[in-house]
Image: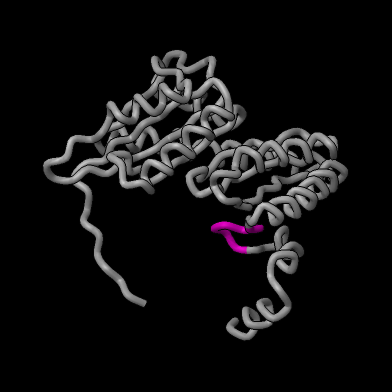
Amino acid sequence: AEFRLLPLPETVLGLGIPFPSAEDALAFVVAAREARDAGSALQPRCLEYLDASAFAIARDHARATLGGAWAEGARAYVYTEQEGFAGEDPPLDDWLALAERHRALADDIQVFEGETSLATARAMRHAVPATLNERAARHRATGGRKVSTDWAVPYRRLAEALAMADAEARAHGVELAAVFGHAGNGHPHTHFVARDPDELARIEAALDATVDRVLAMGGTVAAEHGIGKLKRRWLARQLSPTQLAVMRAVK
């Protein structure tokens, strides 16, 4: 393994961009990722996505901490950051132009600069999983719990994959998951709340069908977290017996 040091950025520009639809937000993510890969001035170090359910939580957190209504018409949200170095001006105008081309709610775009401001933006994002965990915990006494996954697909297919996952949830009669996470890598977290054992079984059946279709898209059952209890039964669908044997041997 070879390691090299990366320079510490002198500045970080954060942008919180609300959109009127998930389709607009996810198309923006693809455009931003492709601009980065093409070597343009836009060089996001993260592209975080919140769907309507997740953004409602983040917006409530912002209202409680910052005060006032904000982006009430938004159905999706993207948060991105770009590093800056000596002699460089952050390409704010380029970011705003890209956002507006994808129908962003321009008047509600937030710009975060400086550590205090960036900490506020990140706290709003991290309020989402914290709140969802609290909601799920209320149903433990009745046999419920949270059911969350971290599958991933090639990032250009994320909008297609999320629409498919919603269709599977509807087909199994369960409430749609709240979705948030690393859209720039095609990697969402889908977070269901099961209120009782029957609903838990239907959620797991919906996820079972979703995972098969994720793999058919060239995806993975786990992008950044361990396999754990839920995903253990899916691993053999992705890896061959030889690959699993090698992993066991290494362990």
Closer-to-camera residue (91/83): 91
Question: Residue 215: x and y, percent?
Answer: 69, 56
Position above or below: 221 against 94? below
Residue lying farthest to the front in this orientation: 38
Task: Tell me residue 185's x, y (percent).
Answer: 50, 49
Q: Is-magenta flag for residue 224? A: yes
Q: Is residue 123 above or below residue 229?
A: above
- Secondary structure of the magenta portion, mostly? loop
Q: Which residues are magenta?
A: 220-226
Which residue occupies 63% across, 55% down?
219
Which residue is painted at 36% across and 45% down in the image?
Answer: 36
Quarter the C terminus occupies:
bottom right
Between residues 224 and 100, which one lies in front from this camera angle?
100
Q: Quadrant of the N terminus?
A: bottom left
- Residue furthest to the right in view is 198
Give the x, y percent position of residue 149: 65, 50
